[in-house]
Image: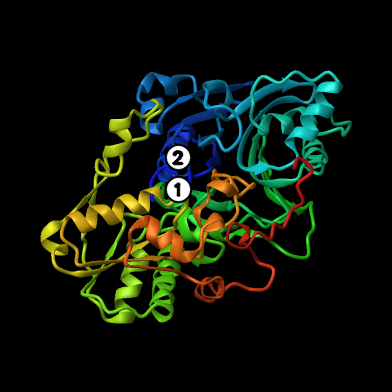
Amino acid sequence: MFDEIHDECGVFGIYSNKQENAKLTMYGLFAIQHRGQESAGIATTDGYGINYHKDMGLVSSVFKDEKTFDKLKGNIAIGHVRYSTTGDSEVVSAQPLVIRHSKGDLAIAHNGNLVNTGVLKQKLEEQGSIFQTSNDTEAILHLIARSLEDNIEDSIVDALGQVKGAYSILFMTNDKLIAIRDPLGIRPLVIGKIDGDYVFASETPALDLIDAEYIREVEPGEMVVVDSNGLRSEKVFFKEKTAKCIFELIYFGRPDSNLFGRNVYLIRKEIGKQLAREHKIEADIVIPVPDSGISAAIGYAEESGIPFEKGIMRNHYVGRTFIQPTQLDRELGVKKKLSPIADVIKGKKVIVIDDSIVRGTTSRKIVKLLKKAGAKEVNMLIAAPPVVAPCYYGIDMPTRKELIAATHTLEETKKYILADYLGYLSVKGMHKAIRTEKNEFCDACFTGKYPIKFPDM
């Protein structure tokens, strides 16, 4: 699936007395680049102030100059990659955000999305706050600065007690690295260790890349503090249930990630097997839409006995563009990214597997490509239930009226995308494949059942 659901953000942080912390953070961000491609940034401290560098673009372009690291010295570093789920796509909204206030210097890197930002901003502006950015993260900084608590840790808890939504956040002061996760645990955040020093990241591949050992997740509602005395933690927010984002496992997480105690590749493979149990189709080959459908297609092929083939090649060198597309761009948009292998497809009954259908436009173009390449039949299977509701917790999805599954029947959608057969994974089958426990995951995008109320709506 391309250009229809965008990743949210990714964070990385390290507390270490070594002097390569900014470089290690950069490499950590490389490993979670899939979570955000609009902007990247790193902030560091040597105990006497916070320096930072951030810009629009990929990590490789923002940190391409070795001289950039000359000013990024210190024993603490945090980094961020962003896709703007809220706020404008501009460098002022790139993170980490850095402020100086009465309790000292503070930097923040936030993954997630708040649902009561409008209410908070109106209240803060009435009290005299002036906002420099259009993103929701800045509201957290204003709440911290205005807190009447004596120290930064209590101020953070006070501030986050006033927000509603999803957050996995890294804070950095001149002497502390603080990680905190919302009480429902919607977005992931893990702890690692490298040579006795502590590392935090959105996903485990960031730990793997720098040879850090995985320790555990930051628990929902937990605040973890690392300073010169080591690591300590406290449960600061309590909920009887969690609402971990199930879409992290289905779509966002890297296949080599371990998210919420599960390996992403193995989960997606099991989803493919469940899809085969629910949709028994006579076909010659199973092919994935790369790269999102590969794991599920492997599972489907194993369960069904139908051969797995790479029938579509993906061009990995096509990056995001911020230029408004022309008619030619729209016509060639999918073709520049995906190319069918005609000799594999021609004359075959094909099962093509993708992870989701959003508006349906990309699926339609893929089916047309396969039929033009000579496919006898194109049976589209989706390794997720129909997306019927938008996400408000950090995933950039279209509105409900733009979601084809929310506005069209299955038969109407099948006709629109020009497929001979269309089948989705059932909600029950999804939970079975992922081995979910009661009240563990948020599946609102598939069910419309939101775990947090919306004061702004």
Q: Are marks 1 and 2 in contact (CB under 8 Å)?
A: yes
- Out of 98 and 75, give the one closest to the viewer: 98
- Residue projecting furthest to the left: 343
Q: How many marks?
A: 2
Query: Where does residue 135 sit, x and y in percent of width and height?
Result: 64, 30
Q: Earlier in the sequence, mark 1 or mark 2?
A: 2
Three-letter code, disc 2:
Leu
Q: Residues within 10 Å of mark 2 (few under 14, many from 20)?
A: many
Query: Where does residue 374 sit, x and y in percent of width and height?
Result: 15, 60
- Checking the image for residue 206, the label placed there is 1
Query: Where does residue 385 sit, x and y in percent of width and height?
Result: 51, 65
Q: CA distance from mark 1 to mark 2?
A: 7 Å
Q: Is residue 19 visible?
A: no
Q: Residue at x 78, y 65 (%)?
A: 240
- Out of 263 and 190, give the one closest to the viewer: 263
Three-letter code, disc 1:
Ala
Is residue 148 toward the left or the right of residue 294 in the image? right
Is residue 83 toward the left or the right of residue 364 in the image? right
Is residue 224 toward the left or the right of residue 235 in the image? left
Is residue 339 toward the left or the right of residue 129 in the image? left
Q: On the image, numbered disc 2 is attached to which residue?
A: 29
Q: Is residue 208 visible?
A: yes
Give the secondary structure at mark 2. helix
Query: Where does residue 193 sit, x and y in percent of width and height?
Result: 52, 51
